[in-house]
Amino acid sequence: MSLPTRRLVIVVRADPVICGHSGEARNLAEVALTRGFDDVRLLTWPVPALQAAGLPLKPLDRLLPYSPGITVERPEPVGDYRVPDGRHIAGLTGRLVELLAEGIPTTCLSMYLVPHTTVVNDAVTAARAAGFAPDVRTVAKAVGSDVTNVIKSCLRDGRYGAATVLFTTFLASDEVVAVSEYTREEIVASAEQVDAHCGTRFAEECRRRVTVSYPPIDASAYLDLDPAEVDAALARRGLKRGGYLLFLSRVARAKGIYDLVIAYGQMRCRDRVRLIVAGTGPALEHVRAMSKEDDQITYLTDVDDREKPLLMAGCAAYVLPTKPEPDFVETFGIALAEKMLAGGGPIVTTLTGGTGEAVGDTAVLVEPGDIAALAETVDRVVLEMPEAERRDLEVRARARAMLFDRGAVFDGLFPSAEPAALAG
């Protein structure tokens, strides 16, 4: 059996985690097969470790399969209970060293600086120190929570040593990328704070080196949906086209779920449209208990990737009133771009973080945290917006979201990759 000629390894929290960046990894992996990579691997965590972490997970029995040529590896931990967190990191790092030792030209992409970029850096260092001379290029992509959660928490708590480690880890990669322009600006601003306190020079290097690569989306999964398939999916849920508002996201305070449930209680349109909350997350049980007397609100915790675009296409409006919180700021809004492709009713959202980069001028905007304005805006969209305006928003939104199609994003991130038919 011959060895591959070109390998892409993506170190990430992959499926079944409900996270836009697990979708990013899947989409980049699929495109890589058409761009000259003949071996693509997602290096990720064992499912029990993901479950133990309390992460929101998709139904395990309905995960979409990957194309042949893509291998999902979940290395077992190294050592026993006396090495609590390092066991899994050692497993990931060790497996990557084994792959690098094969001598196959390899690109390593890490998403989440903690710990995935550390895994890549350590593996490359170990492989070189062992004399394997790996042919490898590393790319570190800073996703939103790297900044809004990890780096910002270091700065809030005055943990400048940890912040220094994060920046040196990030900048040790051959290429450094941010998921949005907002994220890039936050990286630079955070680096300036560390520099001011520590006398380092991270900000200058970040300004010079960090580029932007938006999340890649499989547009084909959202375009040209079969109307009969949409209607059938809705019927299975007891829904009909235009008969519901849709919140489909992680159910968390920062996503505006509390604001939406309170606002829905004030909406005039509630007699015409139900509220469907699709997803799981840390606020789910609390918000479900809070709204238990409202039989117009339905919670769906088992929506899979096949059903998601169908629900988006059939809604009267998609509402994501995301707002900044200490532990999370929406740094792009992958679900917004997916909804823009699927069509259906207008998007109602906020200009929080990087959402403006996703929606441009194709969404109806409200101020973050303004519950009364949210209720009034959704009422206007559902009860008063002319059909021509709705259609115009839908058409322009779809055209804008094509900027984020996975093929275009991949080619921007890996410009040296060649189409499979031309490679070699």
Image (cartoon, helix red, strand yellow):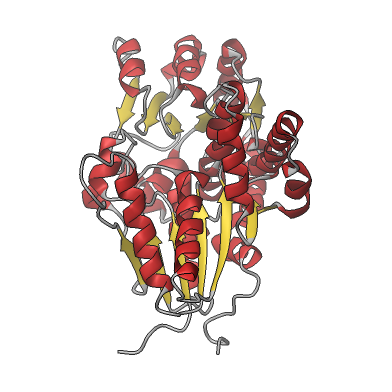
**Left or right of 211 on screen, residue 265:** left
Q: Quadrant of the N terminus?
A: bottom left
Residue 288 picture location, percent across and down: 32, 18
Snapshot quadrant of residue 346: top right
Identify the residue at image location x=29%, y=57%.
74
The residue under the point 66% across, 27% down is 365
Query: Is 56 rendered above or below residue 210?
Result: above
The image shows residue 172, relative to residue 263, as above or below, that is below
Residue 58 shows in this picture: yes
Q: How many marks?
A: 0
On screen, residue 336 above or below 225: above
For the residue pair 347 and 62, the one nearer the viewer reads as: 62
Query: In which quarter of the view is residue 281 placed?
Result: top left
- In-front residue for pair 420/224: 420
Say which quadrant the C terminus sits in.
Answer: bottom right
The location of residue 184, given as percent across then percent down, is: 69, 43
Front one among 203 and 80: 80
Whether residue 16 is visible: no
- Provide residue 258's location: percent of width, then percent of height: 46, 17
Name the residue rendered at 21%, 40% in the picture.
81
* Image x and y of residue 353, in percent: 65, 32
| Residue closest to the eye, 94 or 328 | 94
Task: Report the residue at 55% width, 50% height from top.
Answer: 341
Q: Is residue 38 left or right of residue 177?
A: left
Quadrant of the image occupied by residue 202: top right
